[in-house]
Amino acid sequence: MKNRLKVLRAERGWSQQDLAERLEVSRQSVNAIETGRYDPSLPLAFRIADLFGMTIEEIFQRGE
């Protein structure tokens, strides 16, 4: 799954650790989501979308 998480995080000047703390997950989880090695659970995807004030579809796109 492709996502815009790294770009959105960088636009706000947040480190991976900053984002992890806001989402209550590990920094490693943030890294894995950003690099596409891990797809977040639906509840986590909603938390991410809420944090950035966007819809899930605006952040995550299906990969080929």
Image: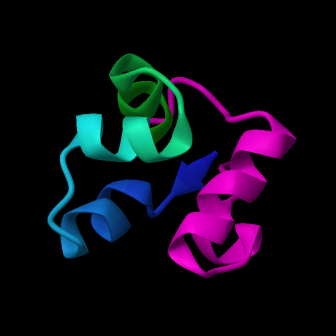
Q: Is residue 37 above or below residue 34?
A: above
Answer with left or right where residue 42 lies relative to residue 7: right
* Most distant residue in the right direction: 42
Please tell me which residue is depicted at 55% across the width and 52% down the height of the picture: 2
Please state which of residues 17 and 32 is positioned toward the viewer in this rendering.
Answer: 17
Q: Is residue 60 within the magenta segment?
A: yes
Answer with left or right where residue 47 lies relative to residue 12: right
Please say which color scheme the image uses.
rainbow
Q: Quadrant of the N terminus?
A: top right
Question: Could you tell me how many numbered marks the image carries?
Answer: 0
Residue 13 appears at what percent x and percent y? 14, 65
Q: Is residue 11 within the magenta segment?
A: no
Residue 62 appears at what percent x and percent y? 72, 55
| Displayed quadrant of residue 31 | top left
Please tell me which residue is depicted at 79% across the width and 34% down the height of the picture: 41
Answer with left or right where residue 14 lies relative to residue 43: left
Answer with left or right where residue 33 lies relative to residue 11: right
The magenta segment = 35-64
